[in-house]
Image: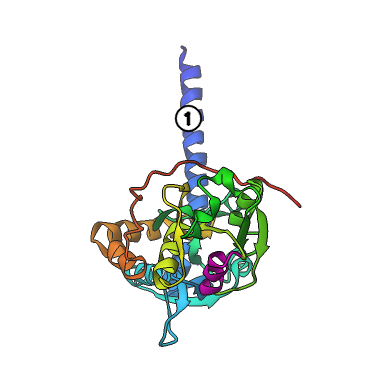
């Protein structure tokens, strides 16, 4: 290789490095998500205030819950204060999109649709789905395939109800019903089954022991995780949040908060055998 070619290649390499460096610098400079939080000394959190035990009001009318207390501790370790704004699920997502909130804490996960616009923290909760049935006869259900023809209870348009429909269940929908209503209707035969998160179902059954229902043993599906949701471009904020969560896990803080609200350590993967993964089909009907 002659001297002219060598010099040309060296010059080109320098240009590439300069351009790459500028691009990285501009990319880093454009992500001021963490700086904004630090400057205002406030982490604005979108949540519901109605989802027990993740985000709800206790007997003293104070907002609390697993996700709420986790994000409070994250904010404290960041040297800022957590400020909560309450919305329904759609409102929480919209608040992130509009920049009204920095983070979402409400037992959130990253489905395919959300993944286009959002990122999620390292998991704060590991869980899976299960079925609540009658104690007397298991509602005639021994597997997901037995859902065909059964009456499945739940709120409309949830992933759980979509799964029930895929397996041929008859959907019985409720609007903001209480746990005792759901469980009583299964017990008296108005409905047959409830599909939902295992730990939420476990707490509901334990809180209402006089209602003769139970979680169907060994019919577990859809291992999943939840975390704290953020806008996709807010990677600097995510990096800081993940750092705090890692330290909280290492020093036992996550376990302590988890056991306070779930009586189990949901911050680690469950020991139960999860039988299958059920993909929710996109349907318009």
Q: Is residue 214 magenta?
A: no
In the displayed structure image, the side of residue 227 where residue 85 appears, left or right: right
Quarter holding residue 157:
bottom right
State the residue at coordinates (39%, 58%). 124
211 over 116 or under it: above or below: below
Residue 125 appears in the picture as rendered? yes
Which residue extends farthest top?
A: 1
Q: Residue at x 36, y 66 (%)?
A: 262
Q: Which residue is mark 1?
A: 13
Looking at the image, which is closer to me, 209 or 30? 209
Describe residue 201's horizontal placement relative to residue 158 as left or right: left
* Residue occupying the far left of the picture: 251
Q: What residue is drawn where x is 32% and y is 59%?
A: 265
Residue 117 to residue 70: above or below: above
Q: Main secondary structure of the magenta part?
A: helix
Residue 31 visible to an observer of this rendering: no
Circle 1 SS class? helix
User: In the current view of this chain or complex, which residue is farthest to the front?
Assistant: 136
- Number of dots carrying numbers: 1
Q: Position of residue 266 (x, y in %)?
A: 36, 58
Residue under the image location 36 percent in, 67 percent down:
74
Classify residue 261 as left or right of residue 119: left
Residue 279 image position (x, y, % from top left): 58, 43
Is residue 181 on the magenta stretch? yes
| Residue 259 rendering spot, x and y as whole percentages | 31, 66
Q: Depth check: 180 or 104 in front?
A: 180
Label 1, residues with CA under 10 Å away: few <14, some 14-19, many ≥20: few
Question: Residue 130 appears at what percent x and percent y?
Answer: 48, 53
Range drawn in magenta: 179-189
Colouring chosen for the image of the structure: rainbow
């Amino acid at each position: 290789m002659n001297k002219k070619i060598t010099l040309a290649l060296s010059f080109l390499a320098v240009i590439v490095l300069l351009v790459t460096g500028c691009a990285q610098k501009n990319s880093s400079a454009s992500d001021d998500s963490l700086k904004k939080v630090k400057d205002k000394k406030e982490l604005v959190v979108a949540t519901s205030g109605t989802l027990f035990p993740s985000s709800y009001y206790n007997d003293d009318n104070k907002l609390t819950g697993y996700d709420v207390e986790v994000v409070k501790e994250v904010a404290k370790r960041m040297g800022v204060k957590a400020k909560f704004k309450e919305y329904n699920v759609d409102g929480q997502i919209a608040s992130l999109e509009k920049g009204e909130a920095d983070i979402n804490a409400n037992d959130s996960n990253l489905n395919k649709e959300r993944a286009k616009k959002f990122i999620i923290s390292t998991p704060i909760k590991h869980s899976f789905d299960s079925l609540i049935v009658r104690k007397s006869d298991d509602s005639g259900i021994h597997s997901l395939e037995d859902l065909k023809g059964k009456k499945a209870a739940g709120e409309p348009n949830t992933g759980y109800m979509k799964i029930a429909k895929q397996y041929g269940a008859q959907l019985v929908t409720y609007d903001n019903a209480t746990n005792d209503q759901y469980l009583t209707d299964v017990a008296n035969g108005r409905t047959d089954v409830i599909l939902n998160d295992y730990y939420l179902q476990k707490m509901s059954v334990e809180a209402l022991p006089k209602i003769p229902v139970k979680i169907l043993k060994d019919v577990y599906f859809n291992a999943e995780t939840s975390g704290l949701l953020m806008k996709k471009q807010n990677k600097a904020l995510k990096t800081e949040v993940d750092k705090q969560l890692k330290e909280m896990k290492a020093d036992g803080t996550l376990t302590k908060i988890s056991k306070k609200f779930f009586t189990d350590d949901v911050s680690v993967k469950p020991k139960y055998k999860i039988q299958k993964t059920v993909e929710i089909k996109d349907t318009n009907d």
